[in-house]
Image (cartoon, grey):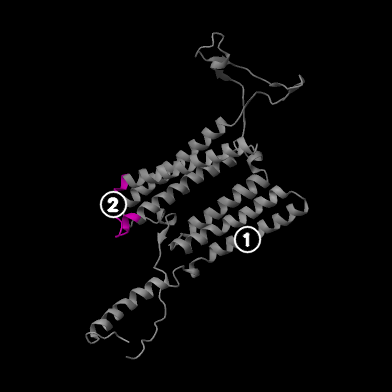
Amino acid sequence: MPKREKRKPVGHEWRHIENKKLVYTIYFVLRLSVVGMLVAQFFNRNYENVSLCVLTLVLFMLPSAFERRLHIDLPDTLEIIILLFIYAAEILGEIRDYYIEFPFWDTMLHTMNGFLCAAIGFALVDILNREEKVSLHLSPFFMAVVAFCFSMTIGVLWEFFEFSMDQFLLFDMQKDTIVNTISTVNLDPSHGTNAVVVKGIQDIILVLEDGTQQSLGLGGYLDVGIIDTMKDLFVNFIGAVVFSTIGYFYVQGRGKGNFVTRFIPRLQRRPAAQVEAAQEKPASDSCEQAAPSGEKPE
């Protein structure tokens, strides 16, 4: 039997490069900026910032890696926002001190995180809903609920990470807040559960082990992270609710509107190896049927 002519693999162009020009341009500009920052921090001998730059470069590669590994296509809008989010958090926030200079910076990023994570959670459920091999068929309402829960879970896990870094490595990822009023049961004279309210706090005096005293001069009481944590979770909640609501109406009117599709990853065509195998299998089966009994096809 003559050898079958090998077909040219189909499906290897599953990542549409021609549609990624804007993404690649932004990726190149941001990466160039990070490399320049890395060199500057190295000569300044600020090796902690050098490590942040290296981490940022690694994080920049994750969207493309996930696309190739999971055979999905990230919409350009989503991919650009992810790159800008990483740059804003690591380079502008940590190295350029935007978290300190602009109090709203952290709030903005956590709100965006809630929105993006809800989009990713929604996409996962949407992909499984459309997959014939998976017996999962959720209603639009439950798809929105799953997206919301996914986003909030990511937000909580991130706060766990910040708390762990502060506790074990003495970082200050959970930023402190200055307050002028506290309410605590620790000051109850009867040692009960009555909360004692202290108002008009203007300063804190630290008494160290050697008996020396130090005034912090902060203009109030130093809250160690709890207000920042709750604020982060609240704005994450807002971002998750917003996208989950939008996603619900998107599924209800499937095909109407382009806004949500800009944020939801979708499955791409199967990779070349799978497509070629699927095409060759019917030809192989027909050869086996045509071969005489007891003989193997060549």
Image height check: is 119 above or below 168? below
Seen from the viewer's position, the closer of residues 8 and 278 is 278
Marks 1/2: CA–CA distance: 42 Å
Q: Is residue 15 left or right of residue 162?
A: left
What amino acid type is highlighted by mark number 1?
Val
Span colored in magenta: 128-141
- Residue 169's spot in the image, x, y percent? 64, 39
By secondary structure, the bulk of the magenta-drawn segment is best described as: loop
The residue indicated by pointer 2 is 137
SS for tag 2? Answer: loop
What amino acid type is highlighted by mark number 2?
His
Residue at 33% across, 76% down: 279
Quadrant of the snapshot with the C terminus? bottom left
- Residue 121's spot in the image, x, y percent? 41, 49
Image height check: is 2 above or below 42? below
Question: Residue lying furthest left in this view?
Answer: 293
Image height check: is 261 above or below 15? above
Q: Which badge, 1 or 2, comes first in the chain's sequence?
A: 1
Look at the image and say whether residue 108 sits in the magenta stretch.
Answer: no
Asked if the residues shown at circle 1 and circle 2 are in contact, with their CB atoms under 8 angstroms apart, the answer is no
SS for tag 1? Answer: helix
Q: Say which quarter of the image contains residue 184.
A: top right
Look at the image and say whether residue 129 sits in the magenta stretch.
Answer: yes
- Residue 191's spot in the image, x, y percent? 54, 11
- Residue 137's spot in the image, x, y percent? 28, 52
What label sits on residue 283 in the rendered view? none
Quadrant of the snapshot with the N terminus? bottom left
Q: How many marks?
A: 2
Residue at 65% across, 55% down: 54
The residue indicated by pointer 1 is 29
Q: Say which quarter of the image contains residue 263.
A: bottom left
